[in-house]
Structures are given as C-alpha cells and as structure tokens.
C-alpha cells in the first residue's frame, strides 16, 4: 500500500472511532487552567486532538492553539479532528524535546499529557502492547531513531540491565533478563512476551508491562525529553500563564514534582530565614490531582494519571 493511501486509511479509521477516545482528566485540566477567550495554548502532546479540541472551544475565535506531536500519523488524525478550527491552529511534527529550537511565541497555557495515545496501544503494528503480536518497534516517531528490536540487538548485557533497572524499576530481574536478551534479535512483541514468560513463569504478568515501559522510554529517550520540557517550558509562559503536565508513573511524576516545587519556592535569607525573593511561579495544584473513581471506571487507561500545574505570577 502506498504511504499516502496508508495514512488516509489510518485517518479514516481513527476518525470513525473518535468518540471512543476519552481525554484523560479533561474536566480537571480545564478547571485548573480556566482557559479564557483569546488565549494562546501550546499542546506539546497533541495526540488525536482530544484536549486540544476543548481548549479551542474554550479560547474562542480570538484564541489559537499550537500543537506538537512526534507521531506523524497522530498529527494527520488530529488535523482532521480539528479541521473546524484550522484557521487558528498551527500543527507541527516535532517532539517537545525540540522546544528550544522551534522559535515558539510565549503562550498563556502550556499542556503536556505524557501518556500513550490510543493508536499506539491499539495498533499492533506499533509494538507498544504485549497483549497483541506485532513488530517490536515502540517508536513514537517512526521516521527516526532505532526500534526496540534494534536496541536489544546492539546493546550489551550491562546496557540492557541499566535500561531495565532505570526505566522499568526492575531490580531483581534486570540482570537475568539482560543476559538472556543481549545481542539477540527479538523481532516481535509475541517473541519477547514468550521469552519473559519462560524466564519468570507466573511473575511474568507483573514484569511484562515494566519491560515494555523500559524499552519504550529508552527507544524514545523520554526522560531526556521531559527534562527539556521542564527546563524550557516555563520560559515560554506569558505573565499569568499556566503550565501543566499529566504523568503516569513515578519516573515522570518525580521530576515534574521536584521542578515545580523548586520553581515555586521563594529564596530565603540563610541567616534570618526570611524570604529574600519571591518565587516567580505559584503552584496551582498543591497536591497532584488524580482521576475520580468514575473516570477510572469509564477510562481504565486514566487510572495512574497525575496532573500538576503552576502559574507564572502576574
């Protein structure tokens, strides 16, 4: 199938199931950000455009949205889903790790949802899920980088063990898994699943998602990208601008929490303990906000989500 026709088929398929896509913490995000008429929103994880659609409705005809996504296919779907707002949207094929290179304007709202989009999990050809068989790819941007298959093949035992410990938080199993995988060619998700089940037996059920998480983070260099977002993002806010991030595991939430706390903590005189300089930002979420029981029931993929936000002081 020609690439143009392939993307066209994918867009039609995803559009037909758009109503099934439920943006995580949608109401919570909007309640915290309180988008106003005429504001500019930067959505650095556009996905299928679920959150973006609500942002655009909220900021009205005088507002605009800039959307980034590392996945070209998602971008094509989002472009269709947001077509009614095309005169006030700018969509870019880019990873938020590139924020400092994109010459973006200051914005009123900067938003990131670090979770996988539905097509990543639902399309076996992307290799993100161990529940279906497909090529062991795991790249958000299939136009660049190495697949998880190639990462395993070209990594030695020590490198793989570090990946599984650092990104999957697998400690007891990391060395055994790495010694089995290092230098091998695991072409499909089913092959990897079978190997893990043979190695760990009944414990494989708990280990499998952590192995896939570790490989995905390594393939996409996700934590380096998050560091870039946390470093550059606040500098893109206008006075009164808000920045918020939805994370899904401690490796993401921890740096978000620490960075936001640092940015919102005033400087104190080391001798007197009095505030010597107010913080430039204030927390909008003293504690991470999580989905309600009803949302988790309606959308099980939201169950581990945490939302944190801050505001550039006026």
Image (spheres, grey):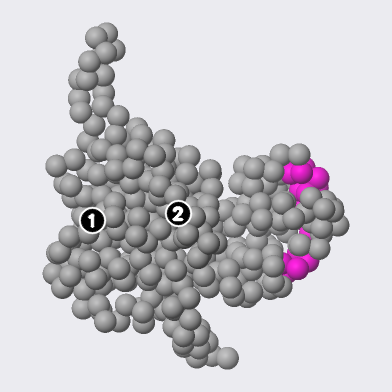
Can you say which quadrant of the picture contains the N terminus? bottom right
Tell me the mark number nearer the camera, choosing from 2 and 1. 2
**Residue 273 in the image: x percent, y percent?**
27, 13
Q: Position of residue 64 (x, y in %)?
A: 21, 68
Q: From what the image shows, is residue 6 above or below residue 249?
A: below
Question: Above or below — where is 192 with respect to 132?
Answer: above
- Horizontal arrangement in the rendering, residue 125 relative to residue 267 (left or right): right
Q: Which residue is mark 2?
A: 291
Q: Where is residue 284, by image quadrant?
A: top left
Could you tell me which residue is drawn at 15 percent across and 73 percent down? Answer: 61
View extreme (top): residue:
271
Q: Quadrant of the C terminus?
A: top left
Dot 2 or dot 1, earlier in sequence: 1
Can residue 180 be found in the magenta stretch?
yes
Q: CA distance from mark 2 to mark 1?
A: 18 Å
Q: Quadrant of residue 181?
A: bottom right
Indicate whether residue 114 is drawn in magenta. no
Q: Position of residue 27 (x, y in %)?
A: 34, 60
Q: Which mark is residue 34?
A: 1
Q: Which mark is residue 61?
A: none
Q: Position of residue 280 (x, y in %)?
A: 22, 36
| Between 139 and 264, the one nearer to me in the picture | 264
Q: Front-most of 55 and 125? A: 55
Question: Relative to residue 117, is residue 76 drawn left or right?
Answer: left
Q: Residue at horizontal 62%, vertical 54%?
A: 213
Residue 28's quadrant in the figure?
bottom left
Q: Residues within 10 Å of mark 1 (few under 14, many from 20)?
A: some
Please provide the residue range marked out in magenta.
173-191
**Helix, strand or loop for disc 2:** loop
Q: Residue at x 54, y 48 (%)?
A: 249
């Amino acid at each position: 199938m020609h690439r143009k026709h392939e993307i066209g088929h994918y867009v039609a398929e995803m559009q037909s199931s758009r109503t099934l896509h439920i943006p995580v913490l949608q109401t919570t995000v909007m309640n915290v950000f309180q988008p106003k008429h005429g504001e500019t929103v930067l959505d650095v994880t556009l996905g299928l455009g679920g959150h973006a659609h609500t942002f655009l409705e909220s900021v009205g005809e005088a507002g605009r949205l800039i959307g980034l996504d590392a996945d070209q296919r998602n971008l094509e779907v989002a472009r269709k889903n947001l077509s009614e707002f095309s005169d006030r949207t700018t969509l870019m094929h880019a990873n938020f790790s590139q924020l400092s290179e994109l010459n973006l304007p200051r914005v009123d709202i900067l938003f990131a949802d670090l979770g996988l989009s539905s097509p990543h999990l639902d399309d076996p050809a992307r290799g993100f899920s161990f529940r279906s068989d497909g090529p062991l790819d795991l790249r958000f941007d299939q136009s660049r980088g190495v697949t998880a298959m190639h990462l395993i093949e070209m990594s030695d035992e020590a490198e793989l063990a570090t990946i599984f410990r650092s990104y999957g938080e697998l400690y007891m199993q990391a060395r055994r898994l790495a010694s089995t995988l290092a230098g091998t060619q695991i072409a499909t998700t089913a092959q990897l699943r079978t190997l893990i089940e043979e190695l760990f037996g009944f414990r494989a059920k708990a280990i499998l998602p952590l192995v896939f998480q570790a490989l995905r983070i390594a393939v996409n260099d996700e934590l380096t990208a998050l560091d870039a977002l946390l470093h550059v993002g606040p500098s893109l806010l206008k006075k009164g601008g808000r920045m918020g991030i939805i994370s899904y595991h401690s490796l993401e939430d921890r740096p978000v929490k620490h960075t936001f706390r640092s940015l919102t903590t005033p400087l104190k005189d080391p001798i007197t303990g009095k505030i010597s300089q107010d913080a430039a930002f204030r927390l909008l979420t003293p504690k991470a906000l999580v989905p309600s029981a009803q949302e988790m029931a309606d959308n099980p993929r939201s169950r581990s989500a945490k939302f944190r936000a801050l505001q550039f002081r006026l």
